[in-house]
Amino acid sequence: MTVGRAVWPDQLDATERALLSPGLPPNLDRRPDVLVVGGGIVGCATAAACVQAGLGSVGLIERDALGAGASGGAAGLLQPEAHDGVDPPKFVAFMRQSLAAWRDLHASWPGGVGFVETDWKGHPQGRVNPLRAIARLAAGLPCIATGVTLTGFSDGVVHTSEGDFHPKTVVFATGNPPPVQSLNVPAFEVRGHMLCSQPTALSRPDALIDLVTMLEDGRLLMGGTLDVGDAERVVRPEITARMWQEIVSAWPEAATSSIEYAWACFRPAHPDHLPVIDRLPGTDNAWFTSGHYKTGILLAPATAHALAMWLKTGARPTEVEPFGLARLSQLKTQ
């Protein structure tokens, strides 16, 4: 989830904002070929990938507005090279694959997804407004319902606050592991603070590329922190004040501006900080993905494509083999 005031909604136009809260459509398909549960960036990208893969009728349900969770508070930076030498090589390779998938999705999806080319230390990278990407994806999806809360899953039936759904296949993309069956997946959330300044005419020094992101209107974007051990659903002004002071100390000219937006998002994570992309145990028609931590926006299209291909072919794509559920059981026994 996201608390406080994020910059992203104010960058949307009225049409894009409306796409995030379509409500319950009168033609809601209760028996789609594929039902995606979860309206964050991973869920919306998965629904889009299933449409593009020709998997039949595709529906998506979300308990709140689209992007109301961690997706709506993320920085939207698509920078796999920043993870090189920090995260496991196979994980970084998946990130690079996903950056390419972002470019492909922007080129192939009607109206694009708002992908912005950037440079990070000489590497072509990217950035998105995560809510704009979600809204643009939603504009091309055939059936979306918001305000629908998952209450259970049994015998292939998805139980919700708005009645049952009987999909041929279901994908749970709920951020945290889905609250279904006896699924016991170690998971937690880590709060991260973000801030964004007023528009400026400043030009960021190259040396501060890891500290500050410049948006198109000159706003300074910074975040997010890792507030380990503090899970309260609040924005702490003392934290954002320290963040701003860090910017000003490194770049005194930034003192001519001030914070306009401050928010916090709660990133779902597993103990090894890697996502799970796997079939739901004990089922033959259900998959789930969870715990994308700080890389949910970056990994969304590659995760989505892998899930769509798995559904289409019945075979686990090799690129997601490192992200199976079994590894977490092994962690618990070590």
Image (cartoon, helix red, strand yellow):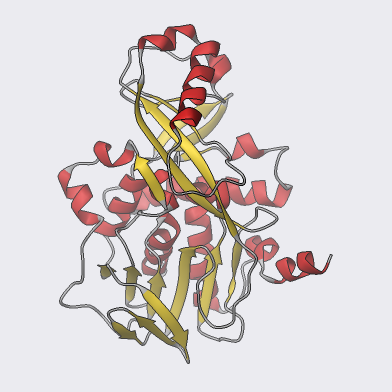
Q: Quadrant of residue 250?
A: top right
| Position of 192 relative to 328 (above/below) | above
Residue shown at 39%/75% (left/top)?
Answer: 150
Q: Position of residue 291 (x, y in %)?
A: 57, 58
Q: Is residue 212 visible?
A: no
Position of 7 compared to 288: left or right? left
Residue shown at 58%/15% (left/top)?
Answer: 207
Q: Front-most of 102 and 128?
A: 128
| Position of 238 relative to 35 (above/below) | above
Q: Position of residue 146 (x, y in %)?
A: 27, 66
Q: Quadrant of residue 209?
A: top right
In the orientation shown, which residue stands out farthest toward the bottom? 155
Q: Front-most of 327 and 100?
A: 327
Q: Is residue 120 visible?
A: yes
Tell me the quadrant of the picture where the C terminus can be found.
bottom right
Q: Quadrant of residue 109?
A: bottom left
Residue shown at 36%/68% (left/top)?
Answer: 51
| Position of 88 relative to 63 (above/below) | above
Q: Position of residue 261 (x, y in %)?
A: 34, 31
| Position of 186 relative to 164 (above/below) | above
In the orientation shown, which residue stands out farthest toward the right? 334
Q: Front-most of 137 and 224?
A: 224
Residue shown at 59%/58% (left/top)?
Answer: 188
> Number of callouts in the render?
0
